[in-house]
Image: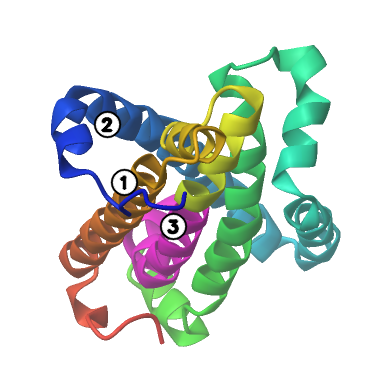
Amino acid sequence: MDGEPLVRRQWILDHLGYLRDLTLDHAVISLVPVLIALAAAVPLGLACARLPRLYQPLAAVFNVVYALPALAVFVVLIPYTGLATRATVMVPLTCYALAVLLPATVDGLRAVPEDVRQAATALGYGPWRRLAAVELPAAVPYLVAGVRVAAVSSISLAAVGALIGRGGLGYLFVDGFQRTFPTPIVAGIALVALLALATDLLLVLARRLLAPWAAGGAR
């Protein structure tokens, strides 16, 4: 890259549509798995909170999955989900997100004081109404904290998918490296960082709306 400027603004201006499409693709393949993981984490976390013996083995399985290198998992999935498909990238990202969200859900449900549960029961709340009106709202700060970690991690890991043909903004890293052209690399880094920052800010706002009593974070 000798003699090549770090950023060519004209290249960025000429490729705004391309950069927009890559950013949207990156958002889909990185954030949809987090939503799927969240939908799975709530019932699983509820089961683990009710049955403590289930939590440790389940958490151990997801911790092992979380420790696996993303690229290796992508490659293993190719024969089953295809090369350069969203599924090949999104399945591992869903598992990684679930490994983060399951403990957050369990911690949130366990954080509800027992006297609060008893008070709700004394007021005539059945198990399902107590769950919806008391336990899940109290777990919101923990859930959102877990989603923030999972979302930012997923946005970062999704770029690795470019090495198997589906990585959103990761294409810019591969393209810039192959052509010894730094502008796409810098643009990709900036867009990944902006996407992560925007997502995190939206989640902070969601937490303030859903749990205004926990504006300082989960306690």
Q: Nearer the viewer, residue 12 or 79?
A: 12
Q: Nearer the viewer, residue 127 or 31?
A: 31
Residue 180 in picture, x, y percent from top left: 49, 40
Check the image and report above or below for 144 versus 18. below
Check the image and report above or below for 72 versus 144. above
In magenta segment, residue 129: yes
| Chain-order first, disc 1 or disc 2 | 2
| Chain-order first, disc 3 or disc 1 | 3
**Circle 3 or circle 1, nearest the eye:** 1
Magenta extent: 127-153
Q: Left or right: where does residue 58 sit relative to residue 145?
A: right
| Chain-order first, disc 2 or disc 3 | 2
**Residue 187: assigned label:** 1
The rendered magenta stretch, by its main secondary structure, is classed as: helix
Distance from disc 1 to disc 2, alpha carbons, whole Å, reads 8 Å
Amino acid type of the residue that numbered disc 1 sits on in the rendered structure: Ala
**Residue 152: assigned label:** 3
Residue 18 seen in the current view: yes
Q: Left or right: where does residue 158 sit relative to residue 58?
A: left
**Residue at the far front in the pictured view:** 3
Describe the element under mark 3 as helix, strand or loop: helix
Check the image and report above or below for 152 versus 187. below
Q: Which residue is mark 2?
A: 19
